[in-house]
Amino acid sequence: MTTPQTIAIGYDGSPSAQAALLWTFQLARSTGATVVVVHAVGLLARFEGQGASLELEQSVGQLAEDVDFDMTQLRWYLSDGDACSVMLRAIDDPVHADLLVVGSRGQGAHAGLLLGSTSLQLAERAHVPLVIVPMERHLDEW
Amino acid sequence: MLVVNGPVEDAEHEEPGHPERPERLTAALAGISDLHLGDAMTVLAPYAATRAELARVHDGSYLDELGAFCYAGGGNIDEDTYATYDSWSIARYAAGAGLAVIDELDRRNAGVGFVAARPPGHHALRDRGMGFCLLNNIAVSAGALVARGERVLIIDWDVHHGNGTQSIFWNEPNVLYVSTHQWPLFPGTGGSREIGGYDALGRTINLPVPGGATGDVLLRAIDDVVAPAVEEFAPTWVLVSAGYDAHRSDPLADLALSSGDFAALARRVARFAPQPGRLTLFLEGGYDLAALRGSVAATLGALVDSDYEAEAPTSGGPGAEHVARAGAERILAIDLALETEPKERDPR
């Protein structure tokens, strides 16, 4: 496997996604890769309004600041759809991700079942390497 | 004559605060009642689709998992989509309702069918529920019709693209899938260059329109782009994914249609049916209850020649140029695909 140039990290603000983002920052720092924070805009986004997206942006900014991650290496990709489809879309134009990263359990997921598990669905469908970051370690350990 | 599926009692598919809620069905049924059809309406007994009927369009492993998930108490399938203990049963009734309505229309060779059921279906993929949808209700009916040799036109005027239906019939030459929808919007699919798989090139027609588009834009899309393709396809059945979230009052999108526009769309689409008794509409989205009630009444009123007074049709919104461009891009995409090896094409 070659060194990843563009890492797409699925982010929904959950503790699992935060752990995955911190792991991604660490990898990107050592490889120089660009980190693209991917957020799926679902059907209910209209009900939640702009506030939800702003909160996510702030939480990513805060995590980057906490670990002193270079913000120039960071980009955003918001796309309409469910989390799995949007992550798969990030492999193509315009993101061209060559590595996908997700937490082991996102918002709305149901442990242990393919149904409701973005990470397991991606493992079945992605045609670039996928890293599923486990939640067993505390956030601070990344 | 209007043929409608019967309601399912004593079962709950509900999550507090979620817009896809039981009151939607109550509103749709109230819209039907507003027509005062009396003997000109037949309400059928509820019918739950069998596993074999569902398996024509869904993977068996997904059906097993969805059933197990519900019987374990349910939960959130994704950020948008929930299931409860009763959802597996309710979803099977929603998927079976169209089969029962079509059987009745077959028997009568007359009338119009309306499937008043939830949860909606057109986002549900072969192997995954999403976008409030668990089973793809219209696809279950279309799959049954195709299995007996029919040629099925599906018109999807829900404000969101019916990615599940498109995906299920991507390579099926006996289904012509047509979607008008707002773009960009969830689920992010439905571009005009999505034209069907190699075995069904041109059997998918996507006509995305911008926010603010009015009824005249969608009628023009039907007349200019869809009608010629339908004439060539020569359907034996017409099914409609009748979402009402393109109404100007809907909280989930930005199109500007009125109930009168749905009446006009229904009249246009009814012309595509080859004979009486070959048109059935399936309730999809629509989250403003008053708009949903009025739009269901206007749609069905137009089809059964009721004197229901709908809102005035709308015109003057943006989108005419988008429709023209989408039609041209579709033709180019088909030409390009015909020059491309099948293995190079991306199956959806």
Image (cartoon, coloured by chain):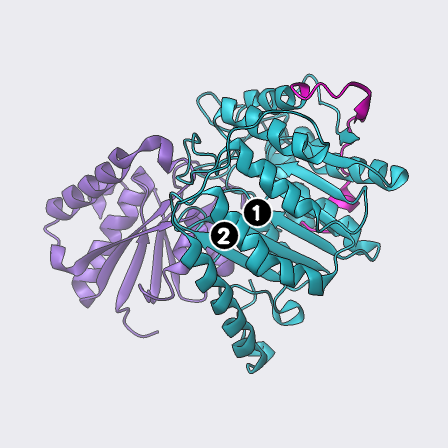
Chain colours: A purple, B cyan
**In this rendering, position of residue B125 left or right of residue A49:** right
Q: Return the x and y of residue B102 as percentages of the image width and height.
A: 80, 40
* Numbered label attached to residue A121: 2
The amino acid on which the numbered mark 2 sits, given as a three-letter code, is Gln
Residue at 47% x, 68% y is B329
Q: Which residues are magenta?
A: B33-58
Local secondary structure at mark 1: loop
Can residue B161 be seen in this snapshot? no
**In this rendering, position of residue B279 left or right of residue A64:** right
In this view, B244 is above or below A5: above
Residue at the right extreme, as displayed: B107
Front position in the image: A71 or B320: B320
Front position in the image: B182 or B270: B270
Q: Return the x and y of residue B162 as percentages of the image width and height.
A: 55, 48
Q: Return the x and y of residue B195 as percentages of the image width and height.
A: 56, 65
Local secondary structure at mark 2: helix
Can residue B290 be seen in this snapshot? yes
The amino acid on which the numbered mark 1 sits, given as a three-letter code, is Arg
**In this rendering, position of residue B283 left or right of residue B321:** right
In this view, A73 is above or below B211: below
**Per the image, is B54 magenta?**
yes
Quarter of the image where the C terminus of chain B is located = bottom right
Q: How many marks?
A: 2
Q: In the rendered structure, are the residues bearing label 2 and label 1 in contact, judged by CB atoms less than 8 Å apart?
A: yes
How dense is the environment of label 1, judged by Cα within 10 Å: few (below 14), some, or many (20 and up)?
many
Q: Which residue is mark 1?
A: B128
The residue mark sitting in front, 2 or 1, is 1
Front position in the image: B125 or B252: B252
**In this rendering, position of residue B183 left or right of residue B153:** left
Chain designation of label 1: B
